[in-house]
Image (tube, rainbow, N blue to C red):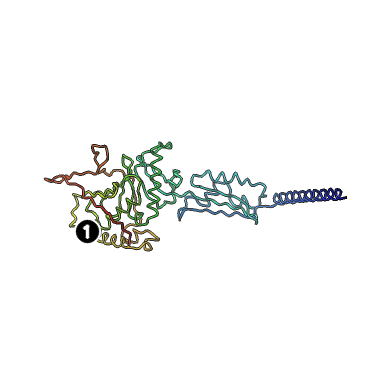
Amino acid sequence: MALARSKISRILLTSLWIAMGAGLIVLLVAAIQRKNTRACKGVEIEIRASGNNYFIDKDDVRRLLNATEKDYVGRPLKDFRLAKMENQLKGNVWVSKANVFFDNNEVLRIKVSEREPIARIFTAGENSFYLDSNLARLPLSDEFSARVPVFTGFPNAGTKLTKSDSSLLKQIKTLSQYLVADSFWMAQIEQVDINAEGKFEMIPNIGEHVILFGDASDLEKKFHRLYVFYHEVLSKIGWNKYAAINVQYRGQVVAIKNETTNTKTGNDSSVANEQRVRQMMSWSPQQWTGGDSLSRALPNYPATRSVAPRNTVTPLKTTGANGVQQPKMTNTGKNSNPKKPVAVMPGKKETRK
C-alpha cells in the first residue's frame, strides 16, 4: 500500500513539472510572437563624451547606421539586427562603446561612449593626432578641439610603431594625465617637446626658459622640485633670469643663466605677469578648481594660444666622459670664465599654501 502511494506521488510530481515546463514554453512562444508583431515607437540617441568634448554627434550616429528615426519608427522589432547596429557604430574610431536595445516601451535606445583624448601629438613631420588612455591614435576633428596637453617631435608618423615608440607613448600618457590632473601645471605648461634622445623639454606659458624634464619617471618629485624653485627663486628674482631649468637629476634643480636677458629692465606687462604668478602660487587648492587657471590669473593673457609644431629648442646638454647627458656648463660671455650652473637643492618638503 505504501509502495503504491509512493509511485502515485512520483507520477503526480512528474506530471506537475511537465505541466509547468509546457506552460513556460507556451508563455515564451506567446511573448516571441507578441514581440514580432510589435513595432518601434521611437528612437533615443545618447552620447557620453569626456567633459565637454564631443567628437561625434547624433547626426554622425545616424550616418553610421545609414538611417534616421523615420526609418525606424513603425518597423517591427523582429526586423532590427541590434548586434549588427552595434558593430556599425564601433567601426568609428571615436566610438569606445555602443549599446543598442529596446526598452519596455518599444523605444530603440542607442547609447554611444566616446573615446577620451588625453594628449595631442605632433610628429616630426608635423602631422598631428590625439592619443587616448588606451594608447589608440585618434584623428583630429574639424569641429572640436580637445583641451589637452600638446606634445611635439614624436618621431614616428607611420602606423607601425617600434618598441621605443610604444614606450614613448606610454610615457606621454603618464605625463599628460599628471598635467591634466594638476590645474597649475596644465595652465603653466604650454607644450612639451620631445628631443632627439626621446626626453621631454617643456615650454612654459610664463617665463623665457626651457624645462629639461628627462623621461616620465619620478613625475611627482620632479614637479615638486620645479615648484619649489618657482616659489623660492623665480618668483623673487624674475621669470626670465634663467634660460634652462633642469629637474631630471635626483634631489636637485640645475639652472642655467640667461646671458641675453637684462633682468633689471622689463615692460609693465611682464612685471604684472610675475605679480600674478606669485598670486597663483599662493592660492589654496580650492581656488584652483574650475575654469582655465592661467586665464583667470592673467586676465589680459590670451585664453587660447595657437601652438605650432615645435621641436627647435636647442638642447642645453653635452655628453660627459661616461656617456651620461650633463647640463651645459659653459658661458659664452666676452672675457668670462666658464661658470658652473646654479644648483638649488629643495631639501625640505613644501606644500602649496
On the image, the x and y values in percent for residue 138 come to: 45, 45
On the image, the x and y values in percent for residue 44 come to: 58, 55
Residue labelled with disc 1: 267
Task: Give, as a three-letter code, the residue at label 1.
Answer: Asn
Measured along the vertical axis of the image, is residue 235 above or below residue 219?
below
Q: Nearer the viewer, residue 36 or 216?
A: 216
Measured along the vertical axis of the image, is residue 94 above or below residue 157?
below
Identify the residue at horizontal 34%, vertical 40% (top origin): 124
* Residue 157 left/right relative to 79: left
On the image, the x and y values in percent for residue 60 come to: 52, 49
Q: Classify mark 1: helix, strand or loop.
A: loop
* Residue 85 left/right relative to 36: left
- Residue extending furthest toward the left: 335
* Residue 33 left/right relative to 205: right
- Can you say which quadrant of the picture contains the C terminus? bottom left
Identify the residue at horizontal 61%, vertical 47% (top origin): 82
- Residue extending furthest toward the right: 1
Q: Nearer the viewer, residue 244 or 3?
A: 3
Q: Nearer the viewer, residue 324 or 127?
A: 324
Location of residue 267 by image quarter: bottom left
Location of residue 276 by image quarter: bottom left
Q: Number of numbered discs present?
A: 1
Measured along the vertical axis of the image, is residue 122 above or below residue 231?
above
Q: Residues within 10 Å of mark 1 (few under 14, many from 20)?
A: few
On the image, the x and y values in percent for residue 328 come to: 22, 43
